[in-house]
Each structure stands twice: as structure tokens, then as C-alpha cells.
Image: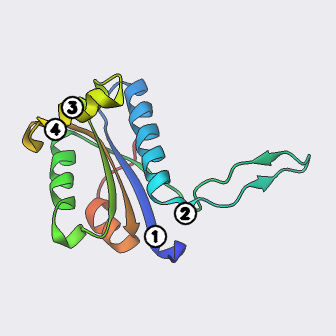
Amino acid sequence: MNIENEKCVIIVDESLPAGMIANTAAILGITMGMKMPDVVGCDVTDADGNRHRGIIQFPVPILKGNAQTLRQLRGKLFSEEYADLIAADFTDLAQGCRVYHEFIEKMAVCPEKDLSYIGIAICGAKKKINRLTGNMPLLK
């Protein structure tokens, strides 16, 4: 993997309260870190000799979207054109579950059309990511 040609973005529904935005971004970040461990740099040491865990080696912008743009984006990610990208989504169904087993059970009986996406993380080739999200503004 050539780090210079890779990009990750997280898109979150801007209408969510600040706490849910932070929670959504954190969950998606942890998921992507597990799926792409090679983008996390080595541990570093500060001037006092204290060790700090490695972080991702490139910026991860948090972009703002809404329910409609997230659904459209997720639909594109199901297509063959973008099948090589690594994507994770977070839905209102997932947000409402307190234990993972509950999430598994509810997802098994929920058609995709009934899911409401509240956040999506995408990592992969910078050109493809830019094609998908290049016109989306930063969440500030």
C-alpha cells in the first residue's frame, strides 16, 4: 500500500447532536482501524521517554452529510465500481442497540431499504474517494 495514494474520510449526518456525531465518528474510526491496521504508524516516544501509540499516518477529514446524501453514498459503495474501497457504515438501528448480539439479531431481519445511515467511513484510493466525496464540506 502506498500511503500517499490512500485516503480515508468519515461522513456524518450533520443534524445529529454533537455527542452522537462524536460517537459515530469514534465507532467508525475504530472499525476502520481494525480493517486497515497497516495505515497506523509505529508507536512514538516523547522527549521525556514516554511512549505514545501510533496514529493513522494521514489526515481523516470528517465531512458533513444528511440522511439523503448518506443513503446515496452507501448505494454507490454497493456498486462494482467502488467494491475495492473499504467502507463501514453506522445506522440508527446500530445506534439503538446496547449489546452486539441485539445488533446481529435486528440486522438479520431488517431490509437495507429500512436502514437510516447516520455515518459512513471510506478508505482506499485517493482518486476514488475524491470522486465520491470531493464536493462534501467539512463538518466544523
46 to 41, vertically: above or below: above
Count numbered badges in the picture. 4
- Type of amino acid at the residue the image marks with label 4: Ala
Question: How busy is the neighbourhood of tag 3: few (under 14 within 10 Å), some, or many (20 plus)?
Answer: few
Compute the Cα span from label 3 to label 4. Answer: 5 Å
Q: Nearer the viewer, residue 107 or 31?
A: 107
For the residues marked 1 and 2, what is the alpha-carbon distance in whole angstroms? 9 Å
Q: Label 3 vs label 1: CA separation? A: 34 Å
Disc 3 secondary structure class: helix
Q: Which is more N-terminal, label 2 or label 1?
A: 1
Location of mark 1 (residue): 6
Q: Is residue 77 above or below residue 127?
A: above
Count residues near mark 2 (Cα–Cα under 10 Å), then give few for <14, some for 14-19, many for 20+.
some
Q: Is residue 10 visible?
A: yes
Residue type for callout 1: Glu
On the image, the x and y values in percent for residue 22 come to: 44, 32
Disc number lying in front (3 or 1)? 3
| Residue linked to disc 3 | 105
The amino acid type found where label 2 is placed reads: Val
Query: What residue do we see at 67% from left, 54% from top?
Result: 54
The secondary structure type at the circle numbered 2 is helix
Residue 16, position as x, y percentages in the image: 31, 28
- Location of the C terminus by quadrant is top left
Q: Check contact, mark 1 vs mark 2: CB within 8 A.
A: yes
Q: Which residue is mark 2?
A: 39
Q: Which mark is residue 108?
A: 4
